[in-house]
Amino acid sequence: MSAAILTATASDLGRRIAARELTSVEVTRVFLGQIKRVDADVHAFLHVDAEGALAQAAAVDARLDAGEELGPLAGVPLALKDLFCQEGVPTTAGSQILAGWRPPYSATVTQRLLDAGIVILGKTNLDEFAMGSSTENSAFGATHNPWDLDRIPGGSGGGSSAALAAFEAPLAIGTDTGGSIRQPASVTGTVGVKPTYGGTSRYGVIAMASSLDQPGPCARTVLDAALLHAVIAGHDPMDSTSIDAPVPPVVDAARSGDVRGLRVGVVRELSGEGYAPGVEQRFGEAVALLAQAGAEIVEVSCPHFGYALGAYYLIMPSEVSSNLARYDAMRYGLRAGDDGTRSAEEVMNLTRGEGFGDEVKRRVIIGTYALSSGYYDAYYGSAQKVRRLIASDFDAAFEQVDVLVSPSTPTTAFRLGERTADPLAMYASDLCTIPSNMAGNASGSFPCGLAPEDGLPVGFQVMAPPLADDRVYRVGAALERALGGGVLTDRIAERWTAGAAPDGSAPDDTARDRAEEA
Amino acid sequence: MALTTADVARLAELARIALTPEELERLAPQLDVILDAVASVSEVATADTEPMSHALPLTNVFRDDVVTPSLPAAAVLAGAPSVEDGRFRVPRILGEGA
């Protein structure tokens, strides 16, 4: 019973809760039990809000019992990236500087989830301030990939992707500045979509780089991601860059999956040197499946994508250096060294020195340099021009094709510790995902099998023009169907759900014991 | 070398981040490598390319000047590192002898 709930899709759980075959409290208890049972091994969560989740679930059950019609995901539990403010619930952004802080308000995305009756189980781990590709930059310890606990779950949203893959939640929320939704989805065999910039509200999301940050849905199936997308998307007057336009028909597209006649462009520049053979093989097979499903495949060149990583690591740190100036030790968060003799400036220096980790310091310093007079034109100015060239590449490509495709990230999950001493190797994880953040178009990652050499998940990226998010889901759904064999994460379901007690309580054995037996 | 240890120390000071000598030794060479890698942007950034600061064609957003409730002061002060008389208590902001 409880294993069946853990592996069910969110849409199925929502349907059964609405039909009163299951209660939200019952479902929520099962997932809280799973978190208790396996999260010591996975470390997907920074905070589990059992009390709050059960109260939300009970409220949804009461509304449904009273005959109220709620949305398709009402009563379904979700894991929320710890970058989203949730009133009264600890929100850290993975940083010591915010340890223990409880926001006095909720992000628009958080509020829309709660309004839709979605139950928030807790806050998931991330690289500090969402800066990283492995969660190893979290001040509170790394998350482990449920496919292989010695490997990274991706980042920055590795807590959300690992929670999905270890069946600790059927839904999760991430943010994507340079790939923080798509790369974790790729390496955990899950689905993650970065909506068109402005498609989802940034209000109450702790900012990294405001012109690039975008919240988005994470799930194990394409339809679940689309249903969640529809809940959180749409205009928000509290975000000045929110687009005032109808939400693209993502759910219809996910249900349809019809790609007949769709023109699919394979990006020539996102392949070759640096790409693992198994990644290229599974990607190529997936393209062939789309062709069989009726899509028209063409090769497309985006000549400036090779410069995207360099431009990103100038624009993003510049915005970081400005956004993170708010952590000044005065109004909230950590204050260090305030012994009554030191000035505000000295306290500020000490607090930021103590409260920020290495990667945050690197980015703030690079940004400070790139924006300083004398270097501004050479660095930040040039990077902004490259951003224009990348957007022009997309414009030209979308005149020829309806979507662009590539691997989501050049390799499968690398080992924990493998890239921590080499920032540039870590940055290369986002080679394929960054162009869509620069141009602001919609983009998603979908599972496309396991790499033969290591048996680890490979992600397939679909990029669509701004406000054509539905095309991302259409192609994702087509691929999900064509691949057959069910949902990719089901291949590790037995390992993560065997032994889940019928009532959702935690048995004595740990997931690691079972993994070693297997 | 584009960035020396002294440069990084100065930038950290501007960014209000106290770095220990060990941190400075560790971070400075990494920052130099990163900066070297990203310098490739100047290869293609020609004078006639218009810089792009944002993905959206932004226009100013206007709204009616309507009074809406603010957060209660107590809720905001609850997250402060130090509070006195319903206000944020901060360290002295002027130098010694000012």
Image: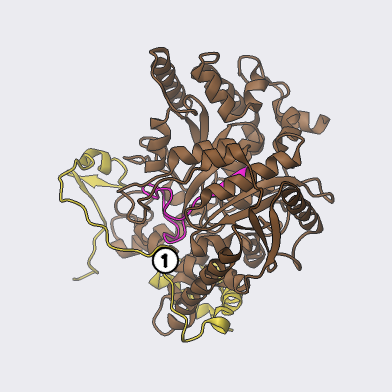
Chain colours: A brown, B yellow
* Left or right relative to A33: residue A147: right
The residue drawn where x is 37% and y is 52% is A242
For label 1, the SS is: loop
Camera sees residue A190 = no
The residue drawn where x is 15% and y is 51% is B65
**On screen, residue A115 above or below A460:** above
Residue A244 location (% of width, % of height): 35, 51
Judge by depth and name the residue closer to the eye, A328 or A5: A5
| Residue farthest along the right direction in this orientation | A453
Judge by depth and name the residue closer to the eye, A362 or A311: A311
Per the rendered image, the range of residues in magenta is A190-213
User: Which residue does the numbered mark 1 point to in the structure image?
Assistant: B54
Residue A262 location (% of width, % of height): 63, 53
Amino acid type assigned to the residue bearing label 1 in the image? His
- Judge the density around disc 1: few (<14), some (14-19), many (≥20) Cα neighbours within 10 Å: some
Q: Would you say residue A205 sits in the magenta stretch?
A: yes
Camera sees residue A317 = yes
The residue drawn where x is 66% and y is 16% is A1
Residue A260 location (% of width, % of height): 66, 48
Instruction: Determine the main secondary structure of the stretch shown in magenta.
Output: loop
Judge by depth and name the residue closer to the eye, A133 or A451: A451
